[in-house]
Every structure is written in structure tokens, then in C-alpha cells.
Amino acid sequence: MHALEGPETVALALYQPDIPQNAGNIFRLAACLGVPVDVVEPAGFDLSDRALRRAGMDYIPHAAIRRHLDWSAFEAARRGEGRRLVLLTTRAEESYLDFAFSPRDVLLLGRESAGVPDAVHEAADARIVIPIRAGLRSLNVASAAAMVLGEALRQTGGFPGIAPAAGTM
């Protein structure tokens, strides 16, 4: 289990992250919102990287981060905990704004350079997209994490002191 206390909450997962600054920003986001983060290795950088520490500032020690050697190890842990895998992908058709989140969801973010392989895409229980303007590829992964995590926490009452939105859960 993750090293967070209190009620179960939505989690973030990074699939083989490429850019330490993005990972650092996501770790900081997770620390501030009390959300655990799973890192599916190998990462494209050393997780003790100076850029990661600079982006995460002094928040990283406050983040509940769990590392997995590979996709198989992550999947075994996730399935063992009975969590639903929700993939953020430009290849989805369902908007995150129309999706019903659960506190047991793990929001999976792909590599900045390549997303996730087809096998990982197919393993997801749900696939969601952030609607953006036509002709543009995608948002920065840390920005996407913040947007979708915010909606998931709003729906599930995961923000401190806020009850779930009416009609959810």
C-alpha cells in the first residue's frame, strides 16, 4: 500500500517518465493534494536527478511514491489492490469531463515522448482524453495530470474538507 494515511484516494501513475522536471512537478502536485504516485520504471532519468529535485523542490519527501521495476510489477500491485486503471491518452474518445471517477482509480500518464505501448493501452479499464483545439497534439503531462486529477478529486471528495459532487461515487 501507499504510505498515505486517511481515506482511500485517487492515485497517479507515471509510465516510464522521460523528463525529470515533469516528474518533479507531478510529485509536488501529489504531495500538496495527498495523492500517491506510482512510477513504472525504467525512467528516462535517475530518480535522484538534480532537475527532478529542483522541480519538486522540498515537496518530494512529502509525496507517497512507490516505484515498480516494470509494467508487470505495477500491474500485479494494482490488480492486487483492486484499483481501476484510467489511462489519459490522446487516442481516447471519452472526455475526462464526462467520466465518472472513483476513489479507487489510478490515473496513468504515459511517456512524454511516446505515450504508452499498445499492450498498456489495451490493459486500461478506461481511456479518457482532455479535449483540446484541433491541429494541436497534446498538453504537457504535468498540466494534464493537474487538470484530470483536479476533476477526479472534485468528484470523489478527495480535496481536504470537500464532499463528493452530487450524483458521483
Image (cartoon, rainbow, N blue to C red):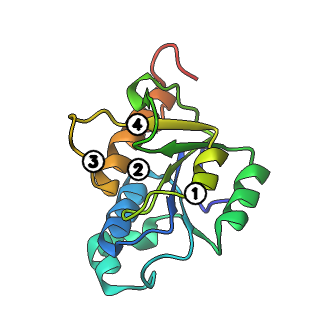
Rendered location of residue 24, percent (x, y): 35, 69
Residue of label 4 = 129
Q: Which mark is residue 53?
A: none
**For the residues marked 2 and 1, what is the alpha-carbon distance in whole angstroms?**
11 Å
Q: Earlier in the sequence, mark 2 or mark 1?
A: 1
- Name which residue lies at 37% across and 62% down: 112
**Quick check: 80 above or below 45?**
above
Give yes or no for contact between labels 4 and 2 (Cβ–Cβ under 8 Å): no
Circle 1 — which element?
loop
Rendered location of residue 19, percent (x, y): 34, 72
Q: Earlier in the sequence, mark 4 or mark 2?
A: 2
Q: Is 125 positioned to the left or the right of 153 in the image?
A: right
Q: Earlier in the sequence, mark 3 or mark 4?
A: 4
Circle 2 — which element?
helix
Residue of label 2 = 33
Circle 4 — which element?
strand
Residue of label 3 = 137
**Quick check: 58 above or below 83?**
below
Task: Between label 3 and label 4, give the one nearer the viewer.
Answer: 3
- Give whichever of 48, 94 is nearer the camera: 94
Q: Amino acid at mark 4?
A: Val
